[in-house]
C-alpha cells in the first residue's frame, strides 16, 4: 500500500477573504485583509473590537430555516466548503462506492456559540431551557458526521482535535486512510466559528490578540517588529483527496499531491512555544523524511506565522536550524496576515493556499509589513505576491498544548 499516491481533486473554502475557493485564492494574491470591526455583538467593553469574519454571511443563503437551527456555525461552514469541494471533483456521487469515501474533518473548539447560548438558557430557564440539539450541535466530531450523513459517505469518519493544528492533523490522517487502503477518497480539512462574545473574551483574557482597533486591516502583521498579537478568524477549508490511479482513471483535474507529513509535541507549555523549537524541528525533519526529500528541494513554506511576538521568532529560528543557508532561498509567507487565525480551520485553509501555490506557481504575500525585525530575517514574501515555480511546499500548523504539524505538498506530475 505504501506506493499509493494521494492527490487533491477538489477544493472548497469559506473564508474572510473569499467565500469560494477561487475567490479565496484571488483574495490572497491581491493581498486582501479580511479583518473588520465586529458588528454582531457589542464590543464596547472588549480590548479587541475586530476580527477576520466571513463577509455578509447569512445562513438562510445556504440552509433551510429548520436545518440551520440544528447546525452550529462550525458545521454550517464545513458543509458549505465541503459541498464546493465535492462538486469541484466532478464525481457523479450515484456512480461511486460511498463505502470508500472517508470524512475526516475537525474543529479545534466545536460549537462554542451553541455552548454559550445554551448555558445562558439553562441559567435563565433551568433544564427545560436546554435544546435537544445542544449536544449534537456542540461536539467536535459532528462536523465530520454531518458531512458523512449528507452525502452517505460510509468510509472512516472521525476527527482529530489539536487546537490550531487540527486542520492539518485531519488532512494527514485522511492521507493515511488512502495511503493504507482504508479508503479511495476522503473529505478532509477543518472548520471554526469562534467570533463570539465568549470567544473574543477568552483570547483577550490571555492577551493573545492584537488590540490595533484604530486600523483592523493592518493588525495581523506577522514578522513585523511592531506585531502585537493575532487576529481571530473563522471559516472552513476542505480538500478532497483521492488515490491517484482512481483519479487518473476518471480523468480528474488534479491540483497537487500530498507526499508526507511530520507530527511532534513541544512538551513545554500549554500555550507558549518552545523557545528552542525542538518540537517544530522534529516535525519539519519528520516531514522531509516522510516525503523522502532534502532541505534543498523545498521552494515554499506557508508558515504558522500568527503575528505574535514570541511565536514568529521561534518558528523562524526552527526553520533556520533545519534548512541552514537554504532557508534564505525559500519563499516563506503567512496567509494569516489576510485571513486572521482561524484556529482549528487554520491548518486546512493554509494547506489549501499551499496547494494552490504549487498549482498556480504563485506565492501569496505576507501583508502589512512596515518595520523589519532583526530576529525575523527570512524571505517572507512581504506585501506583494511573487511568481515562482513551486515543486515542493510545506505548511506548518501548531496548536496550544504543544502540537506541531508539517504537511508536504508537491506540484502534480504524471
Image (spheres, rainbow, N blue to C red):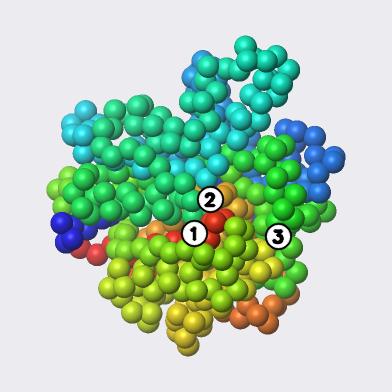
Inspect this view and state whether residue 158 appears: yes
Q: Residue 108 at what x, y percent from top left?
A: 52, 45
Q: Quadrant of the C terminus?
A: bottom left
Q: Alpha-carbon distance for marks 3 and 2? A: 17 Å
Determine whether label 3 and label 1 are within 8 Å by CB: no
In terms of secondary structure, where does tag 1 sit? strand
Please determine whether, in this image, residue 162 is positioned above or below residue 57.
Answer: below
Determine whether label 1 and label 2 are within 8 Å by CB: yes
Q: Residue 53 at what x, y percent from top left?
A: 64, 43
> Pointer 3: residues within 10 angstroms few (<14), some, or many (20+)?
many
Q: Residue 159 at what x, y percent from top left?
A: 40, 42
Please determine whether, in this image, residue 376 is positioned above or below residue 116.
Answer: below
The residue depicted at 47 percent of the width and 77 percent of the height is: 330
In terms of secondary structure, where does tag 3 sit? loop
In terms of secondary structure, where does tag 2 sit? helix
Tell which circle, 3 or 2, labels the residue nearer the N-terminal end: 2
Q: Quadrant of residue 276?
A: bottom right
Q: Which residue is mark 2?
A: 163
Q: Quadrant of residue 289?
A: bottom left
Q: Quadrant of the N terminus?
A: bottom left
Q: Point out the frontmost of discs 3 and 2.
A: 2
Q: Nearer the viewer, residue 347 or 17?
A: 347
Q: Alpha-carbon distance for marks 3 and 1? A: 20 Å
Q: Which residue is mark 3?
A: 229
The residue depicted at 36 percent of the width and 43 percent of the height is: 104
The residue depicted at 67 percent of the width and 53 percent of the height is: 231
Q: Which residue is mark 1?
A: 403
Say whether residue 148 is left or right of residue 335. left
The residue depicted at 78 percent of the width and 54 percent of the height is: 211
Inspect this view and state whether residue 35 appears: no
Amino acid at each position: 500500500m505504501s506506493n499509493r499516491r494521494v492527490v487533491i481533486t477538489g477544493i472548497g473554502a469559506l473564508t474572510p477573504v473569499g467565500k469560494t475557493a477561487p475567490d479565496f485564492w484571488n483574495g490572497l494574491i491581491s493581498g486582501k485583509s479580511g479583518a473588520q470591526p465586529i458588528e454582531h455583538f457589542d464590543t464596547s467593553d472588549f480590548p479587541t473590537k475586530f476580527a477576520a469574519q466571513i463577509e455578509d454571511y447569512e445562513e438562510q443563503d445556504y440552509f433551510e430555516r429548520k436545518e440551520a437551527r440544528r447546525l452550529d456555525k462550525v458545521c454550517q461552514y464545513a458543509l458549505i466548503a465541503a459541498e464546493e469541494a465535492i462538486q469541484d471533483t466532478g464525481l457523479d456521487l450515484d456512480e461511486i462506492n460511498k463505502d470508500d469515501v472517508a470524512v475526516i474533518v475537525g474543529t479545534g473548539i466545536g460549537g462554542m456559540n451553541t455552548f454559550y447560548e445554551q448555558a445562558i438558557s439553562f441559567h435563565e430557564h433551568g433544564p427545560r431551557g436546554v435544546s435537544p440539539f445542544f449536544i449534537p450541535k456542540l461536539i467536535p466530531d459532528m462536523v465530520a458526521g454531518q458531512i458523512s450523513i449528507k452525502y452517505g459517505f460510509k468510509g472512516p469518519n472521525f476527527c482529530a482535535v489539536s487546537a490550531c493544528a487540527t486542520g492539518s492533523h485531519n488532512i494527514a490522517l485522511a492521507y493515511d486512510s488512502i495511503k493504507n487502503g482504508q479508503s479511495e477518497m476522503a473529505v478532509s480539512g477543518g472548520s471554526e466559528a469562534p467570533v463570539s462574545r465568549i470567544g473574543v473574551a477568552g483570547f483577550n483574557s490571555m492577551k493573545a490578540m492584537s488590540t490595533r482597533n484604530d486600523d483592523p486591516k493592518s493588525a495581523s502583521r506577522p514578522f513585523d517588529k511592531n506585531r502585537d498579537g493575532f487576529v481571530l478568524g473563522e471559516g472552513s477549508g476542505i480538500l478532497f483527496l483521492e488515490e491517484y490511479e482512481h483519479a487518473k482513471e476518471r480523468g480528474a483535474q488534479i491540483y497537487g499531491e500530498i507526499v508526507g507529513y511530520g507530527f511532534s509535541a513541544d512538551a513545554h507549555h500549554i500555550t507558549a512555544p518552545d523557545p528552542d523549537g525542538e518540537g517544530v524541528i522534529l516535525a519539519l525533519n519528520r516531514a522531509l523524511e516522510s516525503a523522502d526529500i532534502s532541505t534543498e528541494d523545498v521552494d515554499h513554506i506557508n508558515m504558522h506565522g500568527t503575528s505574535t511576538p514570541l511565536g514568529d521568532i521561534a518558528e523562524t529560528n526552527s526553520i533556520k536550524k533545519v534548512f541552514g543557508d537554504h532557508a534564505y532561498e525559500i519563499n516563506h509567507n503567512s496567509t494569516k496576515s489576510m485571513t486572521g487565525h482561524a484556529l482549528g480551520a487554520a491548518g486546512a485553509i493554509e494547506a489549501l493556499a499551499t496547494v494552490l501555490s504549487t498549482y498556480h506557481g504563485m506565492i501569496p504575500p505576507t501583508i502589512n509589513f512596515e518595520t523589519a525585525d532583526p530576529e525575523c530575517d527570512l524571505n517572507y514574501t512581504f506585501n506583494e505576491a511573487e511568481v515562482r515555480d513551486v515543486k515542493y511546499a510545506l505548511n506548518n500548523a501548531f496548536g496550544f498544548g504543544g502540537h506541531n504539524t508539517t504537511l508536504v505538498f508537491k506540484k502534480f506530475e504524471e
